[in-house]
Amino acid sequence: MLSLSSSTNDSTSFFDCFYAKFLWRSIHILYGIVPPTSISDLFESWSKQGNKKLNTLLLTAAAALLWAIWISRNEIVFDKCKPKSFLQVLFRETHWLHQWASLQRLEGLKDQLVTVAVHLEASALAFFSSNGWLAHRHVDVV
């Protein structure tokens, strides 16, 4: 099993480490989108899911997920600090979705990004709370 460490290939850590696999599988379960296996697969498959608006939404969400994985990897490598849970990485992604939504020029895209972020958060909390994780525990987002 790969981890988010300095010994992994940068593009591999986006898809093969256990944090990344968890996040991509979460997207698959929630939205039915097949997890990518590489950066080129991501841009090939996710950019051809539907119309231009949907593709923009998907690629923006994918960029937020890649950014969350990258930041988490850097914390492990440079700060020797592992995420406390998968949820910490997932909520880091939703944090960036909220931030990037505020930068969108198109109101529809802005609203859709916020909706995706809120849906991911609510779904993750519902899943984990039904499996013993207490929803009142705080998950830090940087």
Image (cartoon, rainbow, N blue to C red):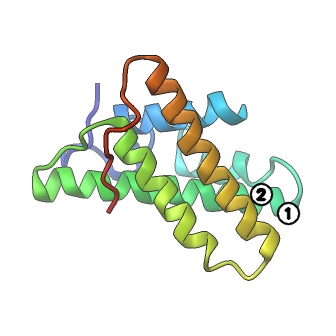
- Classify residue 83 by image quadrant: top left
Which residue is rendered at x = 45% and y = 25% of the image? 129
Tag 2 near tag 1, CB within 8 Å: yes
Tell which of 93 and 19 is nearer to you. Answer: 93
101 up-or-down from 57: above or below = below
| Residue at the spot of label 1 | 52
Amino acid, disc 2: Asn
Position of residue 53 in the picture relative to residue 38 (left or right)? right
27 up-or-down from 115: above or below = above
Mark 2 crowd level (few <14, some 14–19, many ≥20, 10 Å Cα): some
Q: Position of residue 88 (x, y in %)?
A: 35, 45
Viewport quadrant of the C terminus: bottom left
Which residue is rendered at x = 30% and y = 36% of the image? 85
Looking at the rendered structure, the secondary structure element under dot 1 is: helix
Which residue is rendered at x = 39% and y = 39% of the image? 87
| Residue at the spot of label 2 | 55
- Classify residue 84 by image quadrant: top left
Residue 118 makes an appearance in the image: yes
Mark 1 crowd level (few <14, some 14–19, many ≥20, 10 Å Cα): few
